[in-house]
Image: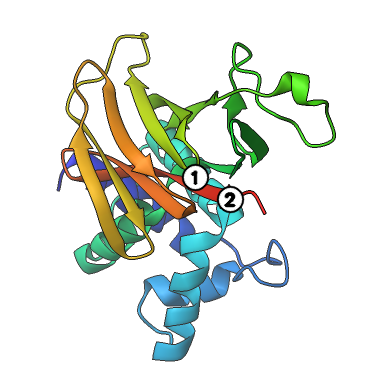
Amino acid sequence: MNADESKIAGILSRLLKRTPKAAHNDECPDEETLAMFLHGKLASKARDEVEAHLARCELCVDELVAAVKAAETTGTEIDVPRQLVIRAMALARRTETGFDIVVRLLRDSLELLSTTGRLMPQFVPVVRGEAKSGEGSALQVEQEVGRFRVAVELELTEPGACRVLANVTEENGQPAEGVRLTLASGDREQASFVTRAGGVVFDRITPGEYSIAVSESGNALGRIRLNLMLER
């Protein structure tokens, strides 16, 4: 059993020994239900519901992270079946970091509607309700994705189309090499590149909803969700 599997096994061991208590909210499973799930004692429908909840609930994921830290400091005894460890690792891989960017493509500028990332101050895009003097043909948003910092720059190259540049850096600020960024629209892959000198470029991106998956050595790290809207 490798180090990651040992951590997951420690989490499961702690959860199986917890005393049942009230759930976080009406949707979160209580500890008794979670323990039954980990023991494989739930009916298929209930098991699927718990799996779906764990894949989307940040609160429950935070609890698992806390259990990991506690297991590391207390040396939790490993007594969980390997099959449950594998399932829990699969669930853990579903959790991703990332951010959203929603932009409107105007005739000669970009209008930032919303973002969950950090807007770089040197770029001054159109902001709703402000004068046109604040317009710009480019904007840049950045955020941590996994262990990397990813900056996404949008540049209007022609009416109704823009260039998307992504720059990936290590924690020490150095360009990250060999990180794969895959642009997709729905379930259809549009392009996929590996960073060179930390960067990749996606050209002639037209209005639509996209995602940019970030991965390293086949391991998913996160996803940038990009919504480009055309001026009406």
Where is residue 7 drawn, in percent x and y? 32, 44
Q: Residue at x 22, y 68 (%)?
A: 83
Where is residue 3 drawn, in percent x and y? 21, 39
Q: Is residue 110 left or right of residue 164?
A: right
- The amino acid pointed to by label 1 is Gly
Which of the 4 image quadrants contains residue 111? top right
Say if residue 15 shows up in the picture. yes
Q: Residue at x 48, y 48 (%)?
A: 225
The one nearer the camera, 166 or 125, is 125
Which of the 4 image quadrants contains residue 185? bottom left
Q: Label 2's element?
A: strand
Q: Residue at x 53, y 50 (%)?
A: 227
Labelled disc at residue 19: none
The one nearer the camera, 29 or 139, is 139
- The amino acid pointed to by label 2 is Leu
The one nearer the camera, 30 or 13, is 30
Where is residue 197 drawn, in percent x and y? 22, 15
Which of the 4 image quadrants contains residue 137? top right
Image quarter where the C terminus lies is bottom right
**Cα–Cα gap, marks 1 and 2:** 7 Å
Q: Callout 2 environment at 10 Å: few (<14), some (14 to 19), or many (20+)?
A: some
Say if residue 80 shows up in the picture. no
The reply to whether the C-beta atoms of the residues labelled 1 and 2 are less than 8 Å apart is yes
Q: Is residue 175 left or right of residue 163?
A: left
- Report the residue marked by disc 1: 160
Where is residue 165 drawn, in percent x and y? 37, 28
Labelled disc at residue 230: 2
